[in-house]
Image: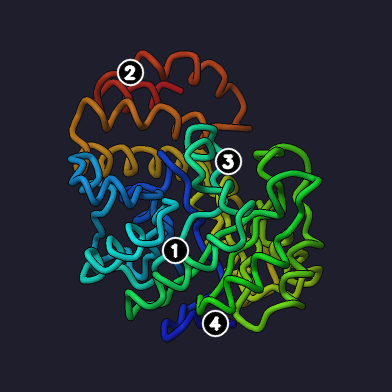
Amino acid sequence: MKHLKIGNIELENRYILGPMAGVTDLPFRLLCREQGAGLLCMEMVSAKAILYNNRNTEQLLTIHPDERPVSLQLFGSDPKIMSEMAKKIEERPFAILDINMGCPVPKVVKNGEGSALMKNPKLVYEIVSAMVKAVEKPVTVKIRKGFDDEHVNAVEIAKIIEEAGAAAVAVHGRTREQYYSGKADWDIIRQVKEAVSIPVIGNGDVTSPEKAEEMFAATGCDGVMIARGAQGNPWIFSELTEYEETGKVPPRPSKDEVREMMLRHARLQLEYKGDYLGIREMRKHVAWYTKGIPNAARLREKINSVESYGELENLLTSL
């Protein structure tokens, strides 16, 4: 099994769970770690929310000992606030600090944060260098191909990120304007890999071990980040590692295994988020877990009316 080293952190494999708001929470990360993910990225956290002691932020910052190593992702656009908040939380048990320069959501972009930062190379340098100086832990950055087709500047931004002292860069092969539509451009990942000497992590359209192998071959990247390909599919990480070790793709989980994983996921949600929020957050996960399963459409119709663990268990057992 090939390893990936980011700064002074050596991962046991090259497969990373990508950060997704509302998805890569603690329960889901634990499941992906159990399945063999080499690194888990948390949901993005606002540096300003930490500054103002936002009460919802503490839950986002919580890390379980069993899920390490973890990458904590901050977003913001003020180098001073970003670096000071990075220093403030450095004693927390994350291994790597990531900077979000890829989020396409309008309210984030409107504030000049997330993928909007790619339009401002000078500010990119200021944020990354300030954070690298503020903390001892490795700092990484997640970027996109560019803001839009007229401004494809991932190579330029990656060079700036390296110059500012970051330990690695993750590249999503889509522009901000694309969001998650169309096909990811893996060639831009190759271009970034050829332009910098820090590790480059490829992201976009990896949904299977074969796709990961294709991405490694096409781009020369050092690691592969799986985000939407892991939704309802924590098994992808055990499949990736097994394929790398044996050259064989393991069989997909049976219906019983899928049901047991959903119920375990639900128990973790309830444990960490309480009955009300936990069961409601499970609804979208159940839709992802059951995608492609025959007769699952009926289940997805009913899932939004489920209000307790018992109801969920009964529904999954009956179907």
* Residue at which label 3 appears: 104
SS class, disc 1: strand
Pick the residue in front: 21 or 68.
21
1 or 3: tag closer to the N-terminus: 1
In space, the residues marked 4 and 2 are separated at their CA atoms by 42 Å
SS class, disc 4: loop
Q: Is residue 181 left or right of residue 17?
A: right
Q: Is residue 95 left or right of residue 212?
A: left
Q: How many marks?
A: 4
Find the residue positioned furthest to the bottom. Answer: 8
Label 3 sits on what residue type? Pro
Label 1 sits on what residue type? Asp
In space, the residues marked 1 and 4 are separated at their CA atoms by 19 Å
Label 4 sits on what residue type? His
> How would you rate the neighbour count of disc 4 (Cα within 10 Å): few for under 14, some for 14-19, many for 20 or more?
few
SS class, disc 2: loop
* Residue at which label 2 appears: 306
1 or 4: tag closer to the N-terminus: 4
Q: Residue at x 42, y 86 (%)?
A: 8
Quadrant containing the N terminus is: bottom right
4 or 2: tag closer to the N-terminus: 4
* Residue at which label 1 appears: 98
> How would you rate the neighbour count of disc 2 (Cα within 10 Å): few for under 14, some for 14-19, many for 20 or more?
some
